[in-house]
Amino acid sequence: MTYRTTWHFTSPNRSLSLMMVIYLVQSGLLVYLITDKFDLEKQIDYQQSWIIELEDKLKLYKVIEDLEIGFSDDEVTKFDQYDLGRKQKVQL
């Protein structure tokens, strides 16, 4: 069986194989994009939790700073030691 390729650039078998290659490339790209999307969402969730943690620490420092106003040096030292002990407990 012979095919005339007067109006076609390639034979039907080559066209089918070319379409299959395009389909496989598209499928691979789709899988890559989906996994990349989920990885980026995980990264965003981690960064948001880190931001919330830093905002909580900032609030704590602002409260301590507000409390330190009007205290003696000994009282400020006690607050700093308490805060340092708290940081070490959080890190463990």
Image (cartoon, grey):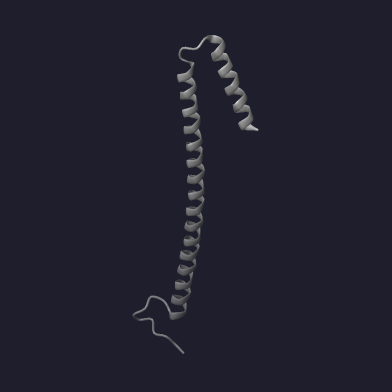
Along the line of sight, the residue nearer the viewer: 47 or 54: 54
Along the line of sight, the residue nearer the viewer: 52 or 82: 82
Residue 77 in percent (x, y) is at 57, 14
Residue 65 in percent (x, y) is at 47, 19
For the point 37% across and 78% down, which residue is it? 8
State which quarter of the image contains the C terminus: top right
Q: How many marks?
A: 0
Q: Establish if 9 lies above or below 61.
A: below
For the point 47% across and 33% down, which residue is it? 55
Q: Residue 66 occupies which quadrant of the picture?
A: top left
Residue 30 in percent (x, y) is at 47, 61
**Is residue 83 shown left or right of residue 37?**
right
**Is residue 51 shown left or right of residue 91?**
left
For the point 47% across and 79% down, which residue is it? 13
- Farthest-out residue, right: 92
Along the line of sight, the residue nearer the viewer: 17 or 5: 17
- Farthest-out residue, bottom: 1
Q: Establish if 57 lies above or below 68.
A: below
Q: Establish if 86 lies above or below 14.
A: above
Residue 2 in percent (x, y) is at 44, 87
- Farthest-out residue, left: 7
Q: Establish if 55 lies above or below 18.
A: above
For the point 51% across and 35% down, which residue is it? 53
Q: Residue 85 occupies which quadrant of the picture?
A: top right
